[in-house]
Image: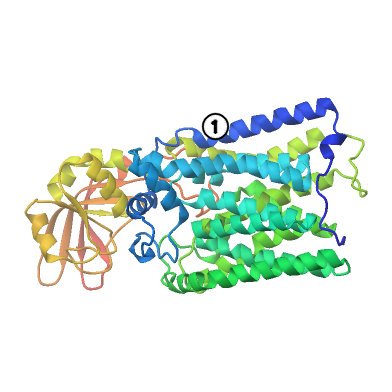
């Protein structure tokens, strides 16, 4: 194995003919335009869904010096950087969708250009082109670029940190190392799980020091880099450790088991990219290609950390370390590029452009149906349409059970003329106001306020139930429902999905259902009427 980390693509453009330069520039421009179009199309037209409502609320209340415990939606050790950046847009009067999605959109578009530029400097134009193409057509990155959370910003910052870190080790450049560490710090301030990159970079530095220990300058730089990483880790430990320790210990419906995490990462990267990544790791390891070290550990360490947390019973999601997809794209580019290079590193005489294009298409093709489904409904649940269809039942019923009560309440306040409140606990006063028809209470099925028990008899993902009548006696409580809606959307992290379109409602399942609840907390359908 070579002791030098590799000079990447130095001077490669100088070896290109003018015709090849023009073709390459044309391909890159088309890719970047396609990346911007895919991420910008209808970005601000989808209804707010899921954690976007938490982002909106937290961005409105955020201010310097706020206690992270005052934020809603998650346990935060640090206030995410994106909340501060969203606040000026809200204060300027932009719509809710623009205010919380503009930053993810800009970060997603920028990430495509940044990945190409940094890969070009590190590994040459062919690897840069392949890795950029894998990113541009990645459905996970497209969705996160249109989703009002911090994931898109974290992906951009983590990408910058990793590739600049590679360049810093290669060139022994302290300035690039400083910029890399600053980008990583910003990524951690945006979302704490980005800190899992620290041990990955630390391992790479140690391996680089071991491989180049006979070179005094390289060994000295590796040692100083490890000290910088250790100092950053110590500085963040006081914030990171309490948050990880407080991470919800009970696995909820949104959390993933280890098999679910693996399936989620495969779905997020795309089946073709995941297979190409596995092949690339094996092939580059067989060739003892030192360029594999950083992207390999940048995948392995964060994924291992999240899997360990899942085994410990923590509520974790694949997108917590979604930045591992960038190293996967990089490994894919390195593998395809290395297949068509001779052992001396020079290009083969035959130009294998058609074969490279075919392999790239095979890697991207399995992701295209998932990418297409993004533009059917934005992978969002259409709460506004459901609320409008259920308006008479909601305004008359006064009590709504919804899988996402905060999202239902947000859209109901935009549509209905009655007061909308949410409550996580049993409240007799609210029960009386519901009976009097003074307000509508939206509640999670986990905590029925009129029953005071933690279980609900029957629920489905994306379901909305409007209570028409509640009957009680000494032994049990009976809910009579006036309307039910099932909102269909797909979870890109639950399994590998290839459906192109999804119905928003299944009207065949909108029935009048009556349930009886006994002390065993199991629901039994007493009657079902179409």
Q: Is residue 23 above or below residue 292?
A: above
The residue pinned by badge 1 equals 37
- Judge from the rendering whether residue 395 lies leftward or rightward of residue 39; answer left or right: left
Report the number of discs.
1
Q: Quadrant of the N terminus?
A: bottom right
Q: At 49% from the left edge and 60% from the top edge, which residue is drawn?
A: 317
**Residue furthest to the left:** 436
Residue 276 can be seen in this image: no
Q: At 20% from the left edge and 70% from the top edge, which residue is drawn?
A: 518
- Judge from the rendering whether residue 130 lies leftward or rightward of residue 155; answer left or right: right
**Residue furthest to the front:** 175
Residue 388, image quadrant:
top left
**Who is closer to the viewer here, 71 or 52?**
71
- Judge from the rendering whether residue 206 lies leftward or rightward of residue 41; answer left or right: right
Q: Quadrant of the C terminus?
A: top left
x and y, in percent, of residue 71 in the image: 35, 60
Q: Is residue 342 above or below residue 253?
A: above
Q: Is residue 107 above or below residue 175?
A: above
x and y, in percent, of residue 399 in the image: 18, 54
**Who is closer to the viewer here, 315 or 10?**
10
**Who is closer to the viewer here, 373 or 222?**
222
- Judge from the rendering whether residue 466 lies leftward or rightward of residue 14; answer left or right: left
x and y, in percent, of residue 457 in the image: 27, 62
x and y, in percent, of residue 456 in the image: 27, 63
């Amino acid at each position: 194995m070579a002791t030098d980390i590799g000079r990447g693509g130095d001077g490669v453009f100088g070896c290109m003919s003018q015709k090849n330069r023009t073709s390459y520039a044309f391909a890159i421009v088309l890719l970047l335009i396609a990346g911007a179009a895919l991420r910008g199309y209808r970005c601000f037209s989808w209804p707010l869904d899921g954690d976007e409502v938490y982002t909106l609320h937290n961005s409105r209340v955020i201010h310097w010096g706020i206690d992270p415990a005052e934020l809603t939606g998650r346990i935060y050790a640090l206030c995410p950087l994106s909340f501060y950046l969203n606040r000026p847009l809200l204060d300027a009067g932009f719509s809710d969708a623009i205010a919380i999605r503009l930053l993810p959109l800009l970060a997603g578009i920028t990430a495509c250009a940044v990945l190409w530029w940094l890969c070009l400097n590190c590994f040459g134009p062919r690897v840069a082109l392949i890795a950029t193409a894998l990113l541009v057509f990645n459905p996970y990155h497209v969705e996160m670029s249109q989703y009002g959370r911090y994931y898109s910003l974290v992906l951009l910052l983590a990408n910058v940190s990793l590739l600049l870190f590679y360049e810093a080790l290669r060139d022994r450049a302290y300035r690039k190392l400083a910029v890399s560490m600053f980008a990583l710090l910003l990524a951690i301030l945006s979302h704490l799980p980005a800190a899992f990159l620290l041990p990955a970079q630390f391992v790479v530095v140690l391996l680089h020091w071991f491989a180049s220990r006979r070179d005094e300058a390289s060994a000295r730089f590796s040692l100083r880099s490890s000290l910088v990483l250790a100092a950053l880790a110590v500085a963040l430990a006081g914030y990171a450790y309490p948050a990880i320790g407080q991470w919800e210990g009970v696995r909820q419906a949104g959390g993933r088991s280890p098999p679910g995490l693996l399936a989620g990462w495969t779905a997020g990267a795309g089946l073709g990219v995941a297979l190409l990544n596995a092949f690339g790791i094996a092939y580059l390891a067989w060739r003892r290609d030192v360029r594999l070290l950083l992207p390999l550990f940048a995948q392995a360490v964060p994924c291992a950390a999240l899997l360990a947390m899942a085994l410990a019973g923590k509520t974790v999601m694949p997108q917590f370390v979604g930045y591992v997809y960038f190293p996967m794209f990089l490994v894919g580019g390195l593998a395809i590029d290395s297949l068509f290079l001779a052992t001396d590193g020079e290009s083969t005489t035959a130009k294998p452009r058609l074969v490279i294009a075919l392999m790239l298409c095979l890697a991207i093709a399995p992701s295209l149906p998932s990418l297409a489904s993004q533009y059917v409904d934005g992978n969002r649940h259409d709460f506004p349409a459901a609320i409008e269809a259920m308006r008479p039942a909601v305004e008359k019923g006064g009590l709504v059970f919804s899988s996402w009560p905060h999202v239902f309440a947000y859209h109901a306040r935009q549509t209905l003329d009655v007061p909308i409140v949410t409550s996580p606990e049993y409240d007799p006063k609210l029960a009386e106001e519901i009976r009097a028809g003074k307000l509508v209470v939206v509640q999670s099925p986990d905590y029925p306020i009129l029953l005071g028990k933690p279980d609900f008899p029957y629920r489905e993902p994306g379901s909305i139930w409007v209570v028409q009548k509640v009957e009680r006696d000494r032994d049990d409580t009976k809910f009579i429902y006036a309307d039910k809606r099932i909102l269909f959307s797909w979870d890109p992290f639950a399994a590998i999905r290839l459906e192109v379109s999804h119905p928003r409602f299944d009207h065949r399942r909108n029935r009048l259902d009556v349930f009886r609840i006994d002390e065993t907390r199991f629901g039994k359908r007493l009657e079902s009427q179409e």
